[in-house]
Image: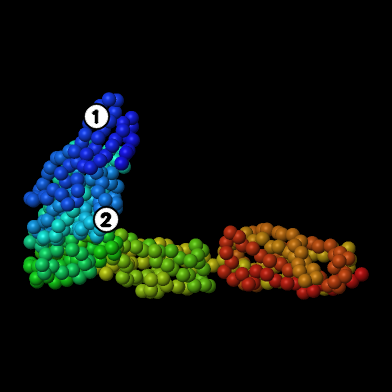
Amino acid sequence: MVRRHAARLVVAFGGVIALLAAGQTAAFAAPTNDDYSAAIAVETLPFTTTIDTSGATTGPTDPTTCANKGSVWFTVTPERDGRLQADTIGSDYDTVLSAFTGEPGAFTHLACNDDYQAQQSRVAFPVTAGTTYRLMVAVCCGNGGAGGGSLRLSVSYVPPPPNDNFADAIAVTGLPYSNTQPYEAATREAGERSVCASSQHTTWYSYTPTTTTSVVAQTNPAYAGINVYLGSSLGGLSYVRCTGLYDYGSLTFVAEAGRTYLFQVSGDGTASHAFQLVEAPDPVANFAYSRSDPNSFELTAFSQTAHDPAGAGIESYTWDFGDGSTSTEANPVHRFPRDGDYPVRLAVETPDGRTDSITRVVEVRTHDVAIVRVKVPTSARVGQTVTVEVHVQNTRYEENVQVDLYKSLAGDYAHLGAVKQLVPVREAGRTTRFAFTYTVTADDLALGKLTFRAAADLSPNRDAIPADNELLSTPVKIIR
């Protein structure tokens, strides 16, 4: 096999690599563990060694799961279950580190890493006592396949977190609290159970509040599970509350003064998680209603927009509409009996008893005018100018009203004009007059009669009963 690398000619044969360049000849003997069958056995842990891999080659049975431009082999058979970590930090070339079990042709790939730190590699994986694991350190693609260099390999157990066991639970001494632990080597004790979060990687925390308060337990990242218990021994725990692995939730509950709560945090074994415990903030009450200008003729729809920052949710709603009426619905509807300013209050409560309330003044104003009469002559001639009187009644609030006048066509109406004026409040039976003039045309004669339509508009106010804002006149007979 002949390879070119930079300005040098590399010739590999047998277990030797010869380097020929500019009149120089150098030969690198293959490392003793170049072949899988001659792997260096790691006898004790932790383990560190430095070897020269300049003459490393790729064997015909070497796995190709990861990059391999020349490799060396190591084996390790751990004496206990746990998690191993191996790295090539301190080597002087670009390494690829991978782990396997099995034999050539039937390898089971466990882990592979190229650039954990600069050009060095690190892998970590769970191990079972008595099982032999194969570590292959290969030259990465960047070295052009010309062997390796000075390899430094370290292998050790990943230590479990200090609160791995129930008896070693970390005591939370004050809130807010946060503590981060790695879960790669966290284990599950014999007899350790989980109600929600099922994982082989658990840690423990304890908390004894001095006053009764609602607390929130969560993790960051949020996909670790939490089981909460009471009790003093692993076999005598009583369940309080839990959230499952990958539920992405938090736990909110009332922690009673003087009682010790045990938190079992279940990680996924691939990351560190911060366990966090804080006092639960109060919920936030709020609401909206369907229109910004409610009136006493129609139902007003109320919708709660409350939320609980602690994540427990809202359990109950209590409404007081300020007129003697109440409701416990989340989103009630209500008709106010008359115009006025009503202090509407919403009180909310969470399942663990935290409360909040808000009061907003709802202004109820009923705007309503009506066109009660359109006065026209009984007949008119072509060319005659007639007066059209529109009478508007208003008994509530002074309004600026625009009246638009239309005349009838065959199957439609044509707009003739508009008059806008102030309409004061008058007692029932009295009206405000809007006057229009219109000159009769030959087109009106062709129809034989003429009907006027009047429409009143209170904008920007909204009329509570818009059905009486339009009225037709009696037909005017058109004669020659």
Task: From the top left corner, tell me how far across and down residue 279 is, in percent.
Answer: 22, 58
The residue wearing badge 2 is 221
Mark 1 or mark 2: which is in front?
A: 1
Task: Give the structural element (helix, strand or loop) at label 1.
Answer: strand
**Residue 225 visible, this orientation:** yes
Residue 125: x percent and y percent?
A: 20, 55
- Image coordinates of residue 47 in percent, x first then y, are 11, 47
- Horizontal side of residue 417 vs 151, given as left or right: right
Kind of residue sitting beneath label 1: Thr
Q: CA distance from mark 1 to mark 2?
A: 57 Å
Quadrant for residue 436, please give it: bottom right
Quadrant in the picture for residue 117: top left
Picture quarter with the N terminus: top left
In this picture, residue 83 sits left or right of residue 338: left
Where in the figure is residue 9, as x and y percent of width and height?
31, 33
Q: Secondary structure at mark 2?
A: loop
Q: Would residue 290 be found to the left or right of residue 45 on screen?
A: right
Question: Is residue 214 visible in this depiction of the protein?
Answer: no
Q: Nearer the viewer, residue 396 or 471?
A: 471
The outermost residue toward the top is 23
Residue 171, quarter of the rendered image: bottom left
* Quadrant (top left, top right, bottom left, bottom right) of the C terminus: bottom right
Above-or-below relation of 196 to 140: below
Question: In the depicted view, which residue is nearer to us: 49 or 408?
Answer: 49
> Which residue shows up at 45% across the image and 65% down it?
289
Q: Residues within 10 Å of mark 2 (few under 14, many from 20)?
A: some
Residue ID at (15%, 40%): 51
Query: Residue visible at 75% across and 65% down?
Result: 406
Residue under pointer 1? 25
Between 63 and 127, the residue placed more toward the observer is 63
Q: Alpha-carbon neighbours of circle 1 within 10 Å: few (<14), some, or many (≥20)?
A: few
